[in-house]
Image (cartoon, helix red, strand yellow):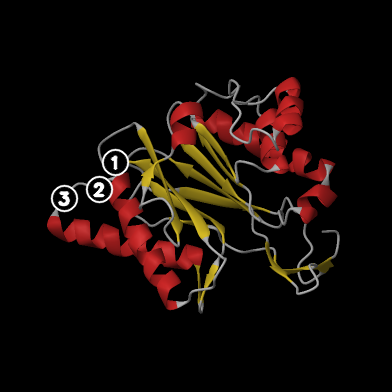
Amino acid sequence: MTLLLLIEASDGLLAVADGRVRRTEPDGSHYILKDDARKAAFTPGASVVALASGRLNFGSADAAAVLESALRRWVCSFAESGARLTVDGAAKACFEALIAADLAHSIPGHGVVVVVAGYDEGQDVAQVYEFTAPDTTGGPGLSPGFLQDRFLALPIYNDTSDLVRAEFGLLTTDQYCERLDHFADDPMADFRGQLSLAGEPLSVVARSVTDVLPTFLATDPDRLDMEGIGGEWLVCRVWPNVDVEDETYAWGPMRPGTSDTST
């Protein structure tokens, strides 16, 4: 499992991804392969970041490497033609690359969800696209969750994602409890609230997240281990018409190379 966050600020986007990768054994237990996996990709020359959740390995390359290579080729092709870079174009380039990688290294029952977010060249309105590989959605499309909330916590229907939503004011305690009570009957119930960080500049959003998230993660490490979330965390700042900036944080929980038999 993976936890990806995407939060819109007044002047940019903040993207966060954990670094844990685990393998499910035949007996149902989980072995943590690494805590420093890279699940986000970007390249100089574009205000775009791609985030991957789910299956992360495609032969000798991981999903982030496939996405980064696709973004690099995409930027180079536009530099040669002089055309304008768009997030839609970046999403299509990432989609084609991952579909090809999946066809070459298919694993039945295993897929990846990708979020491509950023700004069209010369524009300051955030665009966010989603797709899956294998393709189950008809290719990249605008993210309905982000369009409504201006925030994503993936996977959407996951206890930890809901707790993060509550932590940042997107979900009240009553809404959280109500959603859990009705999850089995109505998984699409409208539980979205008001994001407390809405309208704040990226510097404030980044500081809030990097202050709050490590404390939040330390409150229930067993839950995170159960959901396969943890390790090193990559935090990316995306501004219009500026290269993506990233920092790595060892927020944990850190347990590489260990067996997790709690699930």
Q: Is residue 45 at all visible to an observer of this figure?
A: no
Residue placed most toward the observer, 129 or 10: 129
- The answer to whether the residue labelled 3 contacts the one labelled 1, judged by CB atoms less than 8 Å apart, is no
Say whether residue 260 is left or right of residue 157: right
Residue with the mark numbered 3: 83
Give amino acid for label 1: Asp
Residue at (56%, 64%) from the top-left corner?
A: 55
* Disc 3 from disc 1: Cα separation: 11 Å
Provide residue 246's location: percent of width, then percent of height. Answer: 52, 50
**Gap between marks 2 and 3, in whole Å?**
7 Å
Mark 3 vs 1, N-terminal side:
3
At x 49%, y 42%, the residue is 237
**Label annotation for residue 120:** 1
Q: Residue furthest left?
A: 81
User: In what quadrant of the picture does the N terminus appear?
Assistant: bottom right
Provide the residue designation for mark 2.
Answer: 85
Q: Report the side of 19 relative to 246 (left or right).
A: right
Amino acid of disc 2: Leu
Residue 250 vs residue 260, the one in the foreground: 260
Point out residue 179 in the picture as x, y percentages from the top left corner: 70, 29
Can see residue 192?
Answer: yes
